[in-house]
Image (spheres, grey):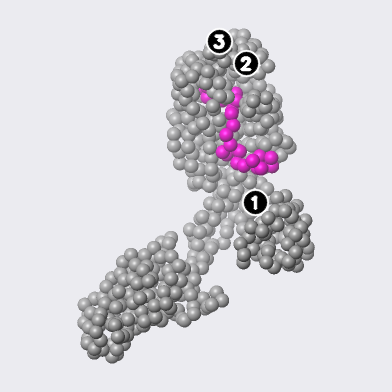
Amino acid sequence: MSARRCRGALAVLLLAAATTAGCSGDGPEDALSAFLDAVAAGDVAAAAAATDSPEAAKTVLTQVRGALDPESLDVEEEDVKQPDGDVVTAGYQLTWHLPRGRTWSYRADAQLRAAENGWQVHWQPTVVHPQLAVGQTLGVLPQLPETAPVLDRDGVPLMRPQNVVGVVVDPSKAGDASAVAGSLAKALHRFEPSVTGRSVLDGMSKTKAGTAYSVITLREGDYQRVKPVIYDLPGVRFARQQRLLPVTRGSGQQVLPAIRALVEQELAGAAGWRIVTQDVTGGEVSELKAEPPRPAPAVTSTLSARIQDAAEKALATEDYPAALVAIQPSSGDILAVAQNEAADDEGALALSGRFPPGSTFKIVTAAAALSAGDVEADSPVDCPGTTTIENRVVPNEGRFDLGRVPLKTAFARSCNTTFARLAAGLPSAALTDAARSFGLGADFVVPGLTTVTGTVPASDSAVQRAENGFGQGTVVTSPFGMALVAATVQAGKVPTPSIVKGMPATTKNVGDAPSDDVLGALRGMMRDVVTSGTATGLRDIPDVAGKTGTAQFGDGSRSHGWFVGYRGDLAFAVLLTEAGSSKPAVQAAHRFLAGIG
């Protein structure tokens, strides 16, 4: 922080004033410089000590610095207006450099008076600003631009600014707390099941003295429905504000709040600001500085309202946690992120869950084997009912046995034994490297989202590689990660995902895409899965390609169901936890694609 000291002319005038006053000790020049230097440096104690009223000065200077929170302060262009005996009046300019590149500059005056121990700044609040009076404080007030809607990729509103009402209760004024909590729970439980009499009582009991407990925030329409029964409850207060909310209640719960947070950051950056003086009640007295907000444009998401709606409806009837992620391969745009209520209760499974991918991982294993030149799509391979790798018995589901068949058939029918053997024969890092070429194990920092693609550890153990090869072992992925795998097959490279137009992800550890020959083979093999393999339930929808997966977990008695695939410029992954097999995931994928039309 800088403070520019008095110029030579000022020094002469102040010296003359000191001689006239006939006082011993420091002259007025030193006293003023010491005060202004301390103010600029943020040394409130030293600045206050340079005045004739240190306690009052310290109180005001502390409040002002706390309100402005300056990054630096410049003091310059000092001059003496007129020496008058033992009183000297000096003018100076203060330039406050505030956060977010804001600057506030103005002129102020200070009187210096001779005292027994030298010259001192005569303390008045006007020393800080000419319009700051005794008993007043400074305040910095934001001026937010009007909130614009969030639109989907086709211009359909996903979120709009809407009035909401916060319901809070002051325990000290509630009287019979149990009765108030019960009445609130009875009225509000329908909007938020977690609001119960016990939850409200617990919240009230943990609230610090003098503060209120926030029970719920309601949409204006919901508030009006319950207002007659909660408005007059003792200790209950209401705060109305505007908030960006989904147009469709409950839609996009895993992504729309994140987009709202991005919008709020943008609004904060575009906000205007006002500096005002306030009286002892906090009321505004006068405006000292004002900068209007910049207009906030509508935010365009990569989401498709139509695809998001189809995804949510496809999962809504499932009893177990279910998740679906859809991505546009050509652009990386995230088109939908959906979960059912059971999944929402467990967190962001779609974007950052970690689950064994089961046989969907055979896409990666096939790519690794094809890239190594070990096989081609038409190469004959063995698909026995079981195979043994270093004393580890690997079975097919139900121990089905196809004998010797082309690789594409083993892929379409999902032969664990075939792919366990292929993976066991690969180098230790081959599956890890192949996975990264599809985005698995890569890091994507998507503005607004927390995402995890998955983990595919390298292994020197043939048994471990065999288990990893059919998506068990130590491999874990998320629906987001598997949607990227399907998108990579379709697009020929790993897409860069985004959720807001103009804000692509930054990427790290993404491998080079598989060769065109490998990708071409995978596309044909994934199409065979639908036409003649384990996903024939999708045959009536044209041009679908994909891979099913049944992934055991725990003690092996329970399984997750997967389907990952693409159709045209749409790639997606469906996960139904504890579904028992891939069949329910295929059915959910069918509902999803049929819902899109």
Residue at 46 percent across and 81 percent down: it is: 133
Residue depth check, mark 2 versus mark 3: number of the one nearer the observer? 2
Residue on which the image places disc 3: 380
Pick whichever of labels 1 and 2 is earlier in the sequence: 1
The answer to whether the residues at label 1 and label 2 have Cβ atoms under 8 Å apart is: no
Q: Say above or below: 131 vs 423.
A: below
Residue depth check, mark 1 versus mark 2: number of the one nearer the observer? 2
CA distance for labels 2 and 3: 19 Å
Q: Say above or below: 289 vs 378.
A: below
Numbered tag placed on residue 300 in the rendering: none
Percent from the top left, x then y, of residue 164? 66, 60
Secondary element at image label 2: strand
Pick whichever of labels 2 and 3 is earlier in the sequence: 3
Q: Name the one closer to the observer, 26 or 468.
A: 26
Q: Name the one closer to the observer, 195 or 453.
A: 195
Residue at 54 percent across and 62 percent down: it is: 145
Viewport quadrant of the N terminus? bottom left
Secondary element at image label 1: strand
Percent from the top left, x then y, of residue 161? 62, 58
- Magenta segment: 340-367
Quadrant for residue 116, please give it.
bottom left
Q: Is residue 12 magenta?
A: no
Q: Amino acid at mark 1?
A: Pro
Pick whichever of labels 3 and 1 is earlier in the sequence: 1
Percent from the top left, x then y, of residue 488? 52, 30
The answer to whether the residues at label 3 and label 1 have Cβ atoms under 8 Å apart is: no
Residue at 27 percent across and 73 percent down: it is: 5
Mark 3, Cα crowd under 10 Å, few <14 / some 14-19 / many 20+, is some
Residue on which the image places disc 2: 395
Mark 1, Cα crowd under 10 Å, few <14 / some 14-19 / many 20+, is many
Residue at 53 percent across and 33 percent down: it is: 454
